[in-house]
Amino acid sequence: MTGLLRKSLVSLAVAALLSTSALTPALAQTTLKFISWQVDDAGNGEWWKSAIKAFEEAHEGVTIEFTKVERGAYADTMTTLFAGGQPPHIVHLASFEFQSFADTGWLEDLDPWIKRDGLDMTGWAGQSVCQWNGQTVCIMMSYFGFIMAYNKAILEAEGIEVPTTYEEFLAAARATTKDLNADGIPDQFGTGHETRGGAGQYLTEMLSYIIDAGAYWTDKDGKVTIDTPEMVEGLTRWKTIISEGLTPVDMSAGDVRRLFADGRIALKLDGPWLYGTMQDGAASADTVVAAPPFTVPLGGSSNVLAIPSEITDEEKELVWEFIKLTMSPEFQRTYATVGGNTPPSPKADISGVEETIPHFPLLVKTMQAASDGGIDRIPAGLELNYNEFSKMIQEETQRMLIQDLDPADVVKTMQAQAEALAN
Amino acid sequence: MPNAKMFDLARPSRQHLLGYILLAPAVLLVGFIIVYPLAIAIDLSFQQVRIPRMGTRGAFTLANYQRLFASSEFWMACWVTLKLVTVVTIGSLFVGMSTALLVNNRFRGRTLARLGMALPWAVPEVIAVVIFAWIFDSSFGLMSWLFVVTGLSDTMIPWTSSPAAAFWAVALTMVWKGFPFVSIMVLAGLQSIPADFYNAAKVDGASALQRFRWITLPLLMPVLGVTLVLVILWVFRDFSIIKVLTEGGPLKTTQTLSIMTYDQAFGLHNFGYASAVGVLTLVISVVASIFMLGRGTKAIY
C-alpha cells in the first residue's frame, strides 16, 4: 500500500514538472493590452493596426491585444480598470479625461524616458496639454483645427457666396434654412450642431462663435474670464443660431454629419473627420471643404497615449517602445496618409498627402492657426474639473435658451460657478 | 466509523445540513456579486474619494451625506423620481389592466392581441428607447409631425430639450415598456377567478361595473400588490431609458436618483458622493417596498 502511494506521488511530481516545463514557452510570450475607441474607425483604426503590426514584427514574442470599447462607455471602463488595479498596458485616453488619471498618480512620468532617448518635443502640437503637476504624463497623438464644409448647390440656389465672416455665415444660415415642402416643418437647415450629446461636445459646438467674438472661459493663467462683453456676444451668437432654428436640435453628432452629407444642411463646422462622412453622403458631389469663417479657427487636442505607473519596468519599456514607434517620422507621415489626420510632429513629411486628401493643406493651415493662437477646448485651470465645468456651462446655456434669459446675466452666473469650481 | 456517521446526510436529523450545503454555492455567489459590492458602496459613502482604489481607504467622514442633504440637486432628483414613479406606475397599471381585461374576453384574434400586448416586454430596453428617441426626435420625429399635422402645435416640439416635454417623453416610453408586465400578471390573476362568482353576481343583477368593483378588483389585489411593488422598483432603478433619451436633462428635469448616482460616479468622478446617493436610494427603495407589500396584503378579502 505504501509502495503504491509512493509510486503515485512520484508520478504526480514528474507530471507536475513536465507540465511546468511545457508551460515555459507560453509564459515567455508577452501580451500588452491596448484598449481604444478607435479600433474600427476608418483611417485611425487602420493606422493603429499598422503600428501594432510593425511593433510586433520588431519585438518577437510580444503581441498587442487591441480591444475596442465604445466611446460612450470608455471613461467608465477605464476608470473601472484603473480602480481595480488592472489598467491596460498601453493607455489611450481623450485629452479631456486623462487629467483625473494623472492626478490620482496612475500615469507614469514620461520626462525621464524622453530625456533618456533624447526625443525633441519642440513644436509637437498640443504637447503642452500633457503637462500635469510639472510632469509630462502623456504624448499628444492628435491636435486638429476646425474646418467649414458647405453645400455649394444650396448656396448657389440662394445666390450666396461662401461666408468668410460670422455675419456672412449667419446671413447664409438664415437664407438657407427652409421648409421645402411647405408642411410647416423645416427640412433644410443653414447649419448643424450637436446639442444632444455630452456636455463637453456641447461646449465644443458653442466654442467657434465664442472664440470668434474674442472670448474664452479662462486666460492662460487659469483665471476665469467669462463675465466679459466678448462672452456676452459669443453667447448671443449661439442663442441666435439655436433660437432661430438655424440648426436641427437634439441630434447626435453622427446624425448631424449625416444630414449634411445627404444635402440637408448648408454649412457645417467640424473637425477633419467630417470628410469621411461627406464622401459617403448622397450629396457628396456638392459638399466642399473650406476655411472656417472665424478669425481664429477652433482647434484642440484630441487623444493621448500614456503608460500606467504600476506595470512592471519591462512592460513599461515595451510600451514606451510602442509609443516611440508611433512618434517616428514614418508613422507620423502615415498618420496623415492612412489616418487622414494632421500629425502633431513638426518633422512629419506630409508632402504629397493632398493627392489623396485634396484639402489636406487646409487642415494643416487651420491646425497651425489654432495652435499658434493657443486654442484648445480644455480651459487652463479647469482641467481636473472639466466635466463638472462643461456640465455647468451646458445647463446655464440651456437655461438661457429655455427661459429666454439675457446673456449678460447668464455670464455672471457662469463666472461665479466657474470660480467656485476653480477654487 | 464515527466519521462516517457524522457525514451521513441521509439521516433525518442531518437533512437540514444537506440543504445548507446545496444552498451554499448560490448564497456565496449572491454574497460575492451583491452583498460585497453593496458593502463597498456603503463604505465608500463614508469617505471623501473622487476615484476609489481597491485596497486603499480614506478617513471616515459624514461629509458626503451632509453635502447630499444640503444639495438642491439631490432633493430635485428625489422629486423627479417620485413624480416619475407616480406617473409611470399609474399609467402602467391603467393601460396594463385595461389590456388584460380586454384580452381576457373571448373574441376573434385574441391570441394575436395577447401577443401584441406582450410584445413591448420582449423588446430589449435599449432598442425600445432608440425607437422612441426617433419618435420623439425634435427636428424630424413622428410625434412632433403628428402634433403639427393635426394642428395641436404650430411648430416642432423640442421633446428632449424642453423640461415639461422631456418628462412626458420619458414617462410615455416607460409606460409603453412597463405596461405589458402588468397585463401579463393581471391576466394570470383574472384566469384564476372562478367563473361561478360572476355567474352568481349576474343572477343577482350586478352590472359589469359592479362585478368589476366587487369581484374582480378585490380578488386581483394580491397580484396587484406584488405587481405594484415590482413596477415601482423598476421605475426607481431604471437607468437606460432616461440615459439614452434625455441623459437626465434638460436642466436636470429628468434626472432621477439612479441617473444622479451614475453621473456623479462616472461623469464627475465623485465616487464617495455617488455612493452616498446610491445608499440613500437603496434605503428609500426598501422602505417603499415594505410599505407597499404591507398595503397589498391588507387589501385581500
Image: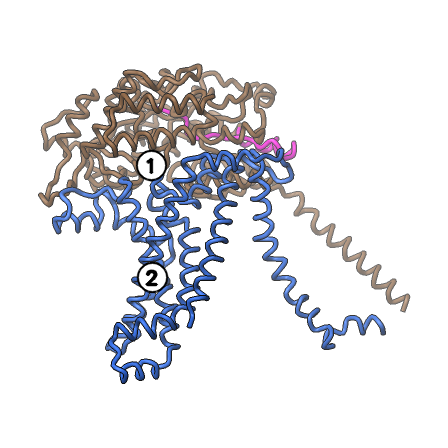
Chain colours: A brown, B blue
Amino acid residing under circle 1: Leu
| Residue A50 visible | no
Residue under label 1, please give it.
B251
Image coordinates of residue A306 in percent, x first then y, are 53, 30
**Furthest-right residue in view?**
A2
Q: Quadrant of residue A156?
A: top left
How would you rate the neighbour count of disc 1 (Cα within 10 Å): few for under 14, some for 14-19, many for 20 or more?
A: some
Question: Which structural element holds mark 2?
Answer: helix
Question: Disc count in the image?
Answer: 2
Marked residue chain, label 2: B
Q: Is residue A178 above or below residue A208?
A: below
N-terminal of the pair, mark 1 or mark 2, is 2
Amino acid residing under circle 2: Leu
Residue under label 2, please give it.
B93
Q: Quadrant of residue A32?
A: top right
Residue span colored magenta: A299-323
At 34% across and 29% down in the image, what residue appears? A203
Q: Is residue A132 magenta?
A: no
